[in-house]
Amino acid sequence: MTNIVAVKKEQHQNVKVATQRDLRQFADQHIAPINVREFAQASTSYPIVFIKDPESGQYRSVVMLGLESGENLYLEGEKWQAIYIPQAISLVPFSLGLDPEKENTLTACVDLDSPFVGEDKDNALFDDKGEETEFFKNIHDQLGRLYENEMTSQNFLKVLTDNDLLQELELNVSFSDGQNKKLVGLYGINEEKLQSLTDEKILELYKTGIFMPIHSMLASSGQVNRLAQLRNASSNAQKVANIQYNVKKAEEK
């Protein structure tokens, strides 16, 4: 359970956060949100894809952590099996949320039910005078950068959708026992349409800065092999014999 609240000096004067925090709460999380500024580093460890909200129709970028719901192959006990950890995960128990006292205003939130939060922990959010500590100021800075990066991600996705550069994918997994699984609802870059852009359009898009994250995303597709390796290293899971992306055919959509 979580109890995420906006941090207020009057109510959370004595709240503290542990210095050492593990990531066991993400053991059942098979995807994690990621922003475009993280693509370059994340692409060396995770497959990056877009998923689509069925209600709003909006896309968001995520990294794949497992091959099925409830599976996080990157977490072994308390150890994360990659050097880079997505910002949204590394900031836990903090997150951005709406300020209940200020309309349409984001503020720092904390999960009061987190095992890393309590009056007996290491890092206070406020000092004896009620002023924010350096620890909490640093959290504010990180959350501010996260918000800015999320805005950049939204602009990136708008450029992709406006230029019809997304396509629906499926991830086909074959297991050593002969079973097959197909993961759907994934979206990636349409390389054919990307390569057919006119010189004028390429120059226009180059000025938006989208090509670096595009190339990072395309390169990350090879990390599905890492998912297979991590799955095969697990003693209790079905062994993967083959894994690959395919473009979802029009008649299947």
Image (cartoon, helix red, strand yellow):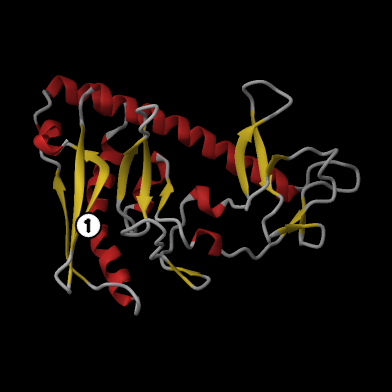
Rendered view: 204 above or below 76: above
Identify the residue shown where x is 37% and y is 56%: 69
Per the image, the residue denoted by label 1 is: 222
Label 1: which secondary element: helix
Using the rendered view, name the quadrant where residue 117 is placed.
Answer: bottom right
Q: Could you say which is closer to the camera, residue 135 or residue 164?
A: 164
Q: Position of residue 37 (x, y in %)?
A: 41, 41
Using the rendered view, name the quadrant where residue 199 is placed.
Answer: top left
Rendered view: 82 above or below 140: below
Identify the image quadrant of the C terminus: top left
- Crowd band around label 1 with a 10 angstrom C-alpha radius: few (<14), some (14–19), many (20+): some
Q: Position of residue 165 (x, y in %)?
A: 20, 30
Identify the residue shown where x is 82% and y is 57%: 119
Using the rendered view, name the quadrant where residue 166 is placed.
Answer: top left
Q: Position of residue 247 (x, y in %)?
A: 14, 43
Identify the residue shown where x is 45% and y is 56%: 29
Give the residue type at disc 1.
Gly
Taking the image as shown, residue 196 lies to the left or right of residue 146, namely: left
